[in-house]
Amino acid sequence: MVKPAMSASSAKLAKSAVSAVSAGFVELAGLAKSAASAVPARFARLAGRAAALGERAYGGECMSFAQIARLLWPLFIDSLFIQAINFVNTYMIAGYGQEAVSAVSMIGSVHSFIANLFVAVATGCAVVVAQYCGMKNMRSARRAAAQAVASSVLIAALVAALLIVFDDELIGLLLGRAVPLMQDYGKIFLIGNAVSYPFFAAVQTVMSALRGAGASKTSIVFSSGLNLANVLLNAILLNAFKMGVAGLSIAAVASRAVFAVAAVAYMFWPHSSLKASLPDFVKPDLRLQRSILYVAVPAALEQVFFHGGRILTQVFIVWFGTASTTANAIVVPFSSLLQICGLAMQTGIVTIAGQCIGMGRPAEARRYIKLITLSSIVASALLSLLFFPFIRPYLGFFGMEPEAWRMAYALNVALLFGTPLTWCISFVPPSGLRAGGDTVFTSVASLACMWIVRVGLGYWLGVSMRYGLYGIWAAMLAEWVVRGAVFLWRLRGDKWHRHEVIREPGGAR
């Protein structure tokens, strides 16, 4: 009789133990749930405080902090993505030798020169669209976007034809002193880029129009898709099919063609923020074309002479030999990485200031230009600190000769300090000035600084004084300082926003 009693007692104890353990687990689960809910609540409070601080610093009558944040963060991601892909492409082509890297870098400067002609039209489009959106005139904004796309594609087709016809002359001018292999690579890359220009112009103009309308999230879809497709095709054609520079050219044409068609098709989509009809593209509207060209023509002329000076300094670098040319080709992508934050804010300020001007609030536009410039300086300084430990690993990717490595390392270190202090004040404020229609002054000032400081001082330091590549980059940093001082001085006055960019039928602005 004892054993059953003991069994009943044991069962009772076991049941009590199970109940206690279960209660413990329930209590622990409750505590875990409370802790889990407390963490998001704490983050929510921190996010709320950060939003309140942001609103006090950035909020205004034209735009709230939330609107500015929604505009800028996709531009930052887009800029980061583009520069990272440029680095990957440079790394992939490095496997084909220093001649391929140098040729792609040199022709890449020509591409930047030509591409900025289309970007000038796209900038005119962005300013006009932003100002019309500020006036709440979406019909004119849509028509302006369509007109700009048509104009940019036509200009791109003409430029492409000229480059293909005169390719030998251009290669002789740029790479006449280079080895024959570098010249062959340069010709292949030049023709490939030329074929892609009409597609490139179309997609760039559509993206600029979207940014002008504040639809930066949609713009980043096209930009990210284009660049991702480009790098994937590069990886396949360079690594799997071993096509070298030819593969780089084919990838550029294919990716730009696909996304140009997609971008233009988006403008016909019923739910597009810039929905347009076929007559908007094919029927010229002189009023809108005047508004676009008012901004685009000075900007285009600036780009012609600005990048002409830049290419001339590239020719100086070719004179210094293959080591200098290779080091420069490696430094340029790193320099672009350091400009990620500034590039995003340079693009965003066109929309922000343009919409303020469209609302008739130039004082608010000035405030935002100053604030965004300061923000770009701080963000670029933090980015430089982040990149400092990675300079040596970055250079190690390319397998350069010791002389080229030493030059590239010294210049990269100099850019870590120079970019936040000089580049941001040189490029962010003029974008804001252009949003107010101050294109003639910004273009003339930019060209004077380029040819007097970068080209003139660069030739004296690099060629005459024999400082070589170091002299060229020292002159470039000096030019950024002078440009920045000029544009900050211009911003203090009122002339920069007293321009009639858009004109309604009957003469109303």
Image: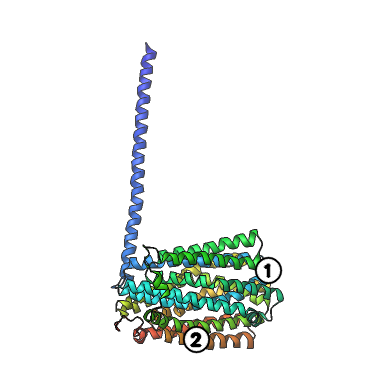
For the C terminus, the image quarter is: bottom left
Answer with mark 1 or mark 2, whichever residue precedes in sequence: 1
Residue 183 image position (x, y, % from top left): 67, 76
Question: 10 Å neighbourhood of mark 2: few (<14), some, or many (≥20)?
Answer: many
| Amino acid type, residue under disc 2 in the picture | Leu
Residue behind mark 1: 97
Q: Residue at x 44, y 79 (%)?
A: 425
Instruction: Work out how far the residue at label 1 is from the one at label 2, CA to CA, in angstroms.
Output: 35 Å
Which residue occupies the extreme top position in the image? 1
Does residue 123 appear to the left or right of 51 in the view shown?
right
Viewer-side residue, 340 vs 275: 275
Q: Quadrant of residue 364?
A: bottom left
Q: Residue at x 39, y 84 (%)?
A: 438
Q: Is residue 381 visible?
A: no
| Amino acid type, residue under disc 1 in the picture | Gly
Element type at marker 1? Answer: loop
Residue 112 image position (x, y, % from top left): 54, 76
Does residue 486 appear to the left or right of 361 in the view shown?
right
Element type at marker 2? Answer: helix
Residue 83 image position (x, y, % from top left): 52, 68
Viewer-side residue, 480 vs 92: 92
Q: Quadrant of residue 24?
A: top left
Q: Is residue 260 visible?
A: yes
Residue behind mark 2: 447
Viewer-side residue, 18 vs 499: 499
Residue 507 image position (x, y, % from top left): 30, 84
Q: Residue at x 58, y 85 (%)?
A: 458
Q: Are marks 1 and 2 in contact (CB under 8 Å)?
A: no
